[in-house]
Image: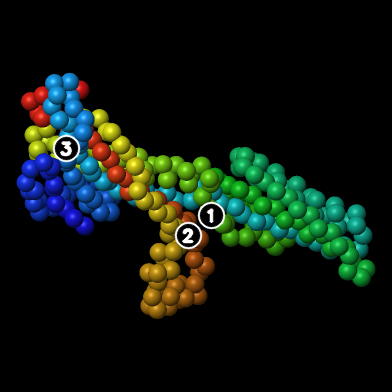
Amino acid sequence: MDNRLRIFPGVAQPVSSVSPFAVNEAEQGVVETQAGSRHGPAGSQARELHVTGTAEVSQPADRASVRLSVGNSKATVNEVTSSVSRRLEYILQAIRQHGVKEEVTVRKFLHRDEEMYHMNVEVTVTFSDFEKMEQACSVLLEKLDRSVSVGQPRFFHSAECLNNVRQSACVLAVENAQQKASRVSQLLGQNLGAPTLVREEETREWRSHEEDEDDEGGGGRRGQEATSAQAAPLPRIPSVTASSRVSVYFRMRDGNRKKY
């Protein structure tokens, strides 16, 4: 990375480093001032400061889906339907009592095997409140015992959450670039004007489970196996991280002149 400060026209002045002014900047970027073609009201030549800013923003998953299944076998259709329907109604009632207002889908499947009728029902519930999710699942496991199967939660990010993470990374990168430009303009004894161009150069996005797989070694896996032998591990809530690198041009004027 080239950290030299170049001023045109004139003689280049090397600077040992240009420190990023935000802890989440991934790289220093380029800081450059140069004479432009625009002129001020008095005919003075305008100058521009070009800086880059980077930022990373992370956000844990904001949604979780849980799959509940219940089934039974009876000699008649009415018996099996009535038996499963009672359990299904209890499941839906327990979900409503815990204030779940998100998406709830129900699938039913009835089939016959020789002289027995089998009915299976699958309920998928999407939660935004993980505490309510844990409470609802605990109640169902306690009240319905083995007649109901509660699957492990599957955590994911909603589309709104992903958009907010991406936008926040870009906005923070611009803020970091502005802070850097402000410090550089003070060092040069000039006034920082309004930005003339903002361009997002690069964006990246990754999820936490990708890093977890890379960090796990042989010792880590053995430790997890020893833990799982005693108790089932708690499900991890994954996070998504978005990074942004922006390029911003600011107009600069001498410190003894008024900003236009």
Q: Is residue 55 visible?
A: no
- Which badge, 3 or 2, comes first in the chain's sequence? 3
Q: Which residue is mark 1?
A: 155
- CA separation, marks 3 and 2? 53 Å
- CA separation, marks 1 and 3? 52 Å
Residue 30: x and y in percent read 21, 49
- Which badge, 1 or 2, comes first in the chain's sequence? 1
Say which amino acid is labelled 2: Arg
- Which badge, 1 or 3, comes first in the chain's sequence? 3
Residue at 78% over, 59% down: 120
User: Which of label 1 and label 3 is nearer to you?
Assistant: 3
Q: Quadrant of residue 68?
A: bottom right
Say which amino acid is labelled 1: Phe
Q: Which mark is residue 35?
A: 3
Residue 192: x and y in percent read 18, 32
Give the tally of numbered discs: 3
Q: Which residue is mark 2?
A: 236
